[in-house]
Image (tube, rainbow, N blue to C red):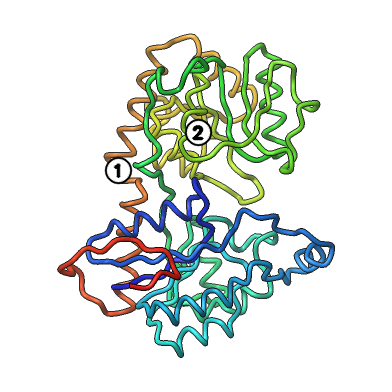
Amino acid sequence: MKILYQGPMWHGSTSLQRAEALARQPGFETIILDSGGRVARLPSLYARVRWRLRWPVDLLSENAALIAAAKLHVSDAIVIDGSKVIRRSTLRRLREIGVKCLAYYTPDDIMGAHNLNHWIRPGFPDWDVIFTTKTFNVPELASAGARNPVLVGKAFDAQVHRPMQPEEVGEEFERFDLVFIGTYEAERCASINALGQAGFSVVVYGEARSGWLSAALNARVELRPSVYAEDYVRALHHGRVALCFLRKLNRDRITQRTMEIAAAGRPMLAEKTDEHDAHFIDGREYAGFLDNEDLLRKANWLLSDETIRSQLGVEGRNRCLRSRYSSDDRAKDIVSHLIAVTGNPKGWPRRVPLRRAGAEG
């Protein structure tokens, strides 16, 4: 089976991790098409107005590039990862070219007002399968006309997310009490300031454009630029405990960061939810907190006992491996649905590598 996978393929992106995981599945040829997703999303007033009106501009010519790649690399299935601008006319053109399966993958809350727009919603019935990582999106998508919404769990990349030794991390190995990596939200900022005010040292890795400002943080909190890929994993080791806040805007109950922290073997202090508890045992594989008071209490507990921290990190990673939370395991779930649509049998006799769109042969 030949799969064309379109998404933002910059180094460290989860889209690239998913594409590479698909390429590692025996019998599948995966061709990746980079949508160029790390440029400024809304560079002009016109584009910003269009975004607010839920009619985003195809700034990167994703529709044209997709059609061109589909003609060049005639594929059994096309997977679109997170794009907000793919039009119904493009999907119809792909059908004419001969694509048997059109699949959409959304890592975010696709039904949230900030993500749902006038390009995406009308096209729900046109997709053969829509993969979502949000449990609540499955019934919402079905109600909105999606024919085949499928839940795919959050994942870690076994090639990237792993424990690092002190010599790999350098002099900042566990320099801080706690570390958080992620975008700004007011509740996150308040919780981190509460930790700083209580006397804990905290390092935050996040972009200023998302809202993080050093002036708004407690003096014991250090703000640094965002990090990705191997640098991201290295930064997780800069704190003795790794914080996992959920994104309220996306109605998160679990997040990709949950899996990445645990897979990296870091003792994780995360917001307690039903989905966190379904994936990890509270008190043994992660530590869950309910509010800021509980956060401070659990932070003090973890930071006062190195043995507990070590056990939490080891058991969290073991759970990731034992329960098969990796990108490769999730890719197996994805390809099973692609096969069901295309009718291609399992167990193809050969394994072929990932290729970049645009390169023939």
Q: Is residue 352 above or below residue 242?
A: below
Count up the numbered dots.
2
Amino acid type at mark 2: Asp
Q: Quadrant of residue 179?
A: top right
Of the two numbered discs 2 and 1 in the rendering, the one whose residue sits closer to the viewer: 2
Left/right placement of residue 346 relative to residue 293 reads left
Q: Which mark is residue 169?
A: none
Decide if residue 138 is in sight here. no
Spot occupied by residue 242 in the image (x, y as percentages of width and height): 51, 27
Residue behind mark 1: 323
Spot occupied by residue 191 in the image (x, y as percentages of width and height): 67, 28
Left/right placement of residue 132 relative to residue 321 reads right
Q: Which mark is residue 231?
A: 2
Residue under the point 54% across and 14% down:
175
Residue lying furthest top in this view?
Answer: 304
Give the distance between the C-alpha atoms of the residues marked 2 and 1, in whole angstroms. Answer: 26 Å
Q: Secondary structure at mark 2?
A: helix
Q: Are marks 2 and 1 in contact (CB under 8 Å)?
A: no
Spot occupied by residue 20 in the image (x, y as percentages of width and height): 37, 55
